[in-house]
Image (cartoon, helix red, strand yellow):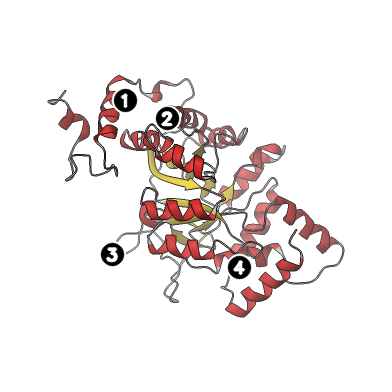
Amino acid sequence: MAEVLPELLGPMNTTGLPSSISTSSNRLKLRIVRFVSTQPSPRSGAIPRVAPHSVSRITSGTAGPSCATIRSPDGGEERRVAGIGRRVLGSTGIEVAELGLGAMDTPTSKEGPATFQAALELGIDFVDTAREYSGSEFLIGEEVRARGSKDFVVASKTFSHNIDGSQRDVDRSMAMLGVDKIDVYQLHDISTPEAWDEVMGEDGALEGLQIAQYRGLIGHIGISTHSLDVARLAIESGAFETIMLEYSAYFTETAPLIDLAAERNIAVIVMRPLGGSGRTSSMRTRMADGYDGPLTAPNLLRYVLSNPAVSVAIPGARFPSRIEENVAAARAFEPMDEGEMRELEEEAGRYYY
């Protein structure tokens, strides 16, 4: 086995582990050897797959045609693609439109495929899905197979808390999405101390994702949570390149954590930027009844994007018309000043429930 390790594991860091694997234990190294040498490649699945797309990245020097200048917090130069500003997903280096799509509910509508197609056609190139989002990965995969290529970034998630389950979920996601590599794979809704201990401990789901990453099946590892305490642990752990948090004018408690993540160069993916489906429905009802205040979907999206520490906002959508509304707001985006943000927070507080 000693003779095989260098070939299987490649360059070692000072801990004796591959430099791409961040762990203090040799346990993961040995697990990688076992899985790489004994597991069949998931590429033999029955569903045809396409090669991973070439993700645009920000590099030193001149930006190429697909490498736009990114919005700068200090008011620096900005260039838009399809009229939507571009941002970088932290240390991943991946560049995406600052407006993405949360695809949890997209398949629940008969217009789901048209909704996803509209998102791509209008410039959205980051889509979030999960194993637990019934039909979501399949819907995305159908579009990938129809196009014959994938020119957008996909982030999926596993609800499993153990090493074997997380790897199985990666394989299943690849089959459903029809790809040979998934850009970002996240631990899903780790929102209690018990769940945190399970996924981070020995034989936990994080180890499974690290093995999948070393095998080249996923590009980057992230986490989603609804817990402020777990979010801080995740950011401070150094184990994740992306973190998904709720943040909106309705819910501002995560703002300090978003700043902390940005300081650590961790990408911040914002879920529920419009406050969630219930509040969005209520807002639309109020507007139909004549409400003409500032609490509107465009302003809520503008609020989130006004935080330069946010990497991408991912409102959900079930219909093409919602995509069109969100894209129009993103194209017209200009940052709010502090006074506007506080005003919207106060208005959201009046309708919070």
Mark found first going from the N terminus, 1 or 4: 1
The crowding category of the residue bearing disc 1, from other C-alpha atoms within 10 Å (few below 14, some 14 to 19, many at least 20), is some
Horizontal and vertical percent position of residue 318: 69, 45
Residue beneath the point at 68% across and 75% down:
343
Q: Which label was assigned to residue 167? A: 2
User: Residue 152, can we see it?
Assistant: no
Dot 2 and dot 1 residues touching (CB under 8 Å): yes
**Residue toward you, 44 or 241:** 241
**Residue toward you, 295 or 194:** 194
Mark found first going from the N terminus, 4 or 2: 2
Query: Against 54, is 295 above or below?
Result: below
| Left or right: 150 in relation to 137 | left
Q: Which label was assigned to residue 303? A: 4
* Residue type, label 3: Gly
Instruction: Count every numbered label the image shows and give the total.
Output: 4
Horizontal and vertical percent position of residue 16: 18, 39
Say which residue label 3 marks. 61
- Cα distance in 3D space between marks 3 and 4: 32 Å
| Left or right: 38 in relation to 268 | left
* Residue type, label 1: Phe
Mark 3 or 4: in front is: 4
Dot 2 and dot 3 residues touching (CB under 8 Å): no
* Residue type, label 2: Gln
